Amino acid sequence: MKHICSALLFFVVCSLTAQEAIFSAAAVNSPKVNADNTVTFYLKNNTASKIQLVGDWLPKTDNVTIPVDLVKTNDLWKYTTKALSPELHTYNFVIDGVKTTDPGNPFVIRDVSSLMNVFFIKGGNADYYVVNDVPHGTITKQWYYSESLDMNRRLSVYTPPGYENSKNDYPVLYLLHGAGGDEEAWLALGRASQILDNLIAEGKVKPMVVVMPNGNVIQQAAPGEGVKGYYTPQFMMPKTMEGTFEASFKDIMAFIEANYRIKKGKKNTGIAGLSMGGYHSLHISRYYENTFDYVGLFSPATLPTKDKHSDVYNNIEETLKTQKENKYQLYWIGIGKEDFLFKNVIDFRNTLDSIGMTYEYHESEGGHEWKNWRDYLVLFLPKLF
Amino acid sequence: MKHICSALLFFVVCSLTAQEAIFSAAAVNSPKVNADNTVTFYLKNNTASKIQLVGDWLPKTDNVTIPVDLVKTNDLWKYTTKALSPELHTYNFVIDGVKTTDPGNPFVIRDVSSLMNVFFIKGGNADYYVVNDVPHGTITKQWYYSESLDMNRRLSVYTPPGYENSKNDYPVLYLLHGAGGDEEAWLALGRASQILDNLIAEGKVKPMVVVMPNGNVIQQAAPGEGVKGYYTPQFMMPKTMEGTFEASFKDIMAFIEANYRIKKGKKNTGIAGLSMGGYHSLHISRYYENTFDYVGLFSPATLPTKDKHSDVYNNIEETLKTQKENKYQLYWIGIGKEDFLFKNVIDFRNTLDSIGMTYEYHESEGGHEWKNWRDYLVLFLPKLF
């Protein structure tokens, strides 16, 4: 009997300890994705005056999402959406005016300095964002020494299913994040490993190594993962778009070639990035001439470089011409019609047109958002290698 | 001018988009660790009635933490703690009775189904929990096929600094989580990779490979990382303590031996775990006779197995005697004086004593908590290999 009590106690006390169930009303699981793709959010609470939520599917006015109210019946607050489109959706609760996370949902992703709760509506491209019953690649978080920056730095690497069990070499894609992101961004918000697993399983994408470095040269690693410890990340960090990252990029390539079984040569090498990472990809693919046969610019920040003092930005048009003359397989540009960089991308396309540099252009709905960047990755990957 | 405007717009609009700054009052960074190790929490809000917090340093009554109130001056809420001890501290905000996360702190760790904000107070063992300027090991998230379970499953592996640049074989420690945990737990709450990096850098711990599998046999992977997608994890899952994991453990060892440069043999092999993982370590180290020279039981759930129907639990005393006769280097037990399993561990030690099985025993303050398990890991690792 004593022993049985101990066993029971294990369940009960551990549950209390682990969950820190400090309030009478237990957290209610939230949200529930209903069969018709409506979604119901729940919160159990008897003391708050107003519980609202903001979500990526709700309309915005001047870039500001209008919160919707959860409705209270007894102590249960509830809100059901209209049917939502397939997507990795993000939302926050607003509790008496404080924007924070839904206590019923332990799944969050950090975007710059904000945490957002997440859930999936399946279907369409979103079926590539979820973990399906297919072979899975391996994710490695690894440190390398950057001689150019004299700094130990962290990067993420995806190796495809079968990498460990073969002696084959693989082509490599360098996949760059945007401002405020880091070596975690394409994995967390970008769902890169799931997209790769699923497209490789369907035979639509060639098995490849995908390298996701950190493009903020003042940062060793994602916030919390480097010696600076926990600190609030900023959207734009110093030295992110002034040539230093591009100039140091050779250290990343050398490390990857030394540590992974990579097929050498231009035809086995690609680079792509979103926003600031698109800017980096544009300049890196020019600066390291004859290195990349595949270039992807996702909502690229094709901004002027006139006021920047780096050799990287010398003779941009001339080096683009050289890039054209050296030939490449694919120069891909994707942008949303509502993207605030849309006009800049038109200017950049005019530059490319003026020098006769060919590119594949994809114009989507929407703006400067992860929804588009995940879509672009799904479109871009099958064109590689 | 047009171009300069675009560049400015990039900063401004991206900042807005990325941060979804949808309310007039911007989030304030929180908390601030002050020079005297007091900690100040902040929240900017003008509509909530009561903002409180609960934290691991606050007193409890019947396992329930008593919340403390933040004090409002104009629209800034504030609370300063007494000086806190060195630790990875956890806390939550309670906004008008809703326990959730601090919107000013993007750093959270999931424990079972709850998210907790975290911050560090440095000093003591906590200096091993932070990322220091030392060589860093590599973290790999990888899938293996378990033949025993006919299931693809995910595990985490730490390889020490230098692993990639050498041809050496390394000893291996299997490090098991507790109930409600998974292959992420020792890395997230346990700070295993930082502890290993820091102790290896000090020369106190031998470079080793550390394997952190998932001990919940009904689970492929941590919640959100497997085909079940996002769902609310439970504290105790079916089939966690009835022999199946122990019986399938050979699949994990075979995978690691095939995929990592592991020194073979008992003297190069250790196993340790916390709570349920201590129970698993106890039984695995008996069941796979003559396999482990190093065993660590951290607050182990040394619970009775009488009602369980698995060959794994046959002849427990006899197999412990065999384990003793086969000899081992270290059988280490750590438990807190306030742990609800304290009495069970006394019973287990009596069993060990009665058969003359020697062990090293560490009795600490505190209870069934991560604070102790991190401490125990710091004590245990230097004794290995």
Image (cartoon, coloured by chain):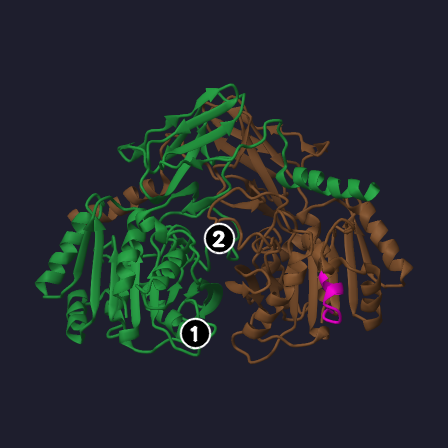
Chain colours: A brown, B green
The boundaries of the magenta stretch are: A284-292
Q: Quadrant of residue A321?
A: bottom right
**Tags 2 and 1 on a common chain:** no
- Quick one: B31 or B286, which is closer to the camera? B31
| A102 on left or right of A89 | left
Task: Relative to A13, say whether A65 is above or below.
Answer: above
Residue A134 figure quarter: bottom right
Residue A47 % position (x, y): 45, 22
How far, Cα to Cα, is label 2 from label 1? 25 Å
Number of the label disc, if any, that sits on residue B98 = none
Q: Residue at x 58, y 76 (%)?
A: A261
* Relative height, residue B336 to residue A100 (above, below): below
Chain ID, mark 1: B
In percent of width and height, residue A218 lies at: 57, 52
Q: In the image, what residue type sits under mark 1?
A: Tyr
Secondary element type, mark 1: loop
Is residue A338 one of those drawn in magenta? no
* Residue named by callout 1: B260
Q: Residue at x 52, y 37 (%)?
A: A101
Of labels 2 and 1, the one closer to you? 2
Give percent across and percent down for residue B263: 35, 77
Q: Which residue is mark 2?
A: A225
- In this rendering, does residue B308 appear at all? no
Q: Residue at x 35, y 64 (%)?
A: B200
Side of A209 relative to B295 (left or right): right
Label 1 environment density (alpha carbons within 10 Å; few <14, some 14–19, many ≥20): some
Pointers 2 and 1 in contact (CB under 8 A)? no
Q: Quadrant of residue A213?
A: bottom right
Residue B223 position in % (x across, y down): 47, 52
